[in-house]
Amino acid sequence: MRFENTVIPLRAAWSSPFVRWQGATADLNSLELAKQVTGRALRERGTTWPVRELVLGWTIPQKEAFYGAPTLAAQLGFPGVSGPMISQACATSVAALHAAAATQDVEPMGARLVVTTDRTSNGPHLTYPRTSAPGGTPDSENWVLDSFARDPMTGESMLATAERVAVEGGMDKSHLDELTVRRYEQYADALADDRAFQRRWMVPITVGRGKRATEIEEDQGIRPAVLEELGALAPVTPDGVVSYGSQTHPADGAAGMILTTAQQARDLGVDGPLARIRSTGFARVDAGTMPKAPVPAARAALHDAGLTFDDVDIVKTHNPFVVNDVWFARETGVDARALNPYGCSLIYGHPQGPTGARGIVELLHALEDRGGGIGLFTGCAAGDTGAAVVVEVTG
């Protein structure tokens, strides 16, 4: 879908640190995390936004999530505001941005607030009544673990999709390990000069209350990627090529952004670069080939923007497996080592809903560092789907 009038001010886009699951945020309700991080981001940025709609993206149910969007809006100081709640697995961030941009583009007065949040830690165990079963025994589901382990359409795990695409692409483990190291080196660039890059947009998380409150200012649970250590890790499945080192880890986090028009941003005194949302794209590939999906999603978004891969200055991906990036490079001609400056979900983790939003925030600031240009974010999602967005940063 093509957009004409909607921008994201770079100073109005943020993410929390990501915390490896079962870590310091394991007991923090993701809606509480969203309220905390979004509220702090809006206060610290100093602009009073005329928010007309809040789009809330999440994928893992939390207590009181039934009331999610209007409750969160009121807690953030927008009592007359509501909006949709969107859940599209790993594509949730792009889907939420797509929904907000669609209304912002045709109703340019005011602004849209996109909030994405999830906690893979302590995922809910759900029961579903079955009155016809013996003794009324219910069906049950571990929302996180069961979803990771099995696609109901294929009966296979997401890991199986990565191994299938690796075989088709003729990938070997040593190449995957080498590219994983490259991805960690890129993430390390974001930590240089006392995390100068991340400090521009990362909003701390407060855990605990009163004297026991502590702040989480940076990602937690990241393991350095060392080639020799990756080489010593056996593949997860016999005869496979993907190890635990060349795939991401579940995490907790929140991210968000303001969508508005360029004129309104300037009228409100917002300084700094603006990122125009050019287009979004979605795709679905053959069953059991999820890592392929970012390619057709990217092509769809670029087509609607009237662009090609040759026009793109920076590409960021959501890559739960490094297999994704190898396939993307093979199919598009983009240098695999050039993808994902300043890091990616392969390294810092995957909270589901906010993963894409963080990647987009990083993309915007990476474009700012080069003086502007065209950026593409694309990633895969459960159900062999993909989602992409094209942005253009100007001064």
Image (cartoon, rainbow, N blue to C red):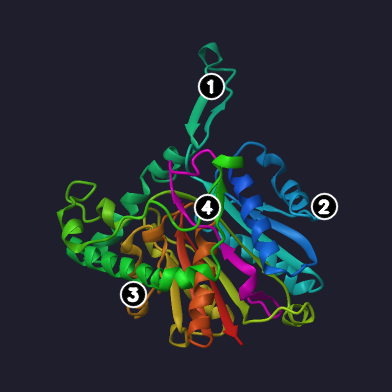
Residue 255, percent from left and from top: 57, 59
Residue most extreme to the right = 80
The residue segment tinted magenta is 1-27
User: Type of residue at label 1?
Assistant: Pro
User: Type of residue at label 2?
Assistant: Pro
Find disc 4 in the rendering and name its residue. Answer: 253
Residue 336 lies in the magenta stretch: no
Find disc 3 in the rendering and name its residue. Answer: 329
Which of pointers 2 and 1 lies earlier in the amino acid sequence?
2
Which of pointers 4 and 1 lies earlier in the amino acid sequence?
1
Residue at coordinates 46% horizontally, 58% vertically from top-left? 218
User: Type of residue at label 4?
Assistant: Gly
Find disc 1 in the rendering and name its residue. Answer: 138
Which of pointers 2 and 4 lies earlier in the amino acid sequence?
2
Marks 3 and 2, how far apart at CA: 46 Å
Q: Which is in the foreground here, disc 2 or disc 1?
A: 2
Tell which of 178 and 150 is nearer to you. Answer: 178
Q: In which quarter of the image is residue 107?
A: bottom right
Marks 1 and 3, how far apart at CA: 46 Å
User: Type of residue at label 3?
Assistant: Ala
Which of pointers 1 and 3 lies earlier in the amino acid sequence?
1
Find disc 2 in the rendering and name its residue. Answer: 79
Does residue 365 lie above or below 381 as drawn?
Answer: below
Which of pointers 3 and 2 lies earlier in the amino acid sequence?
2
Residue 264, percent from left and from top: 77, 78
Answer whether residue 28 is visible to the viewer in this image: no
Q: Residues within 10 Å of mark 2 (few under 14, many from 20)?
A: few
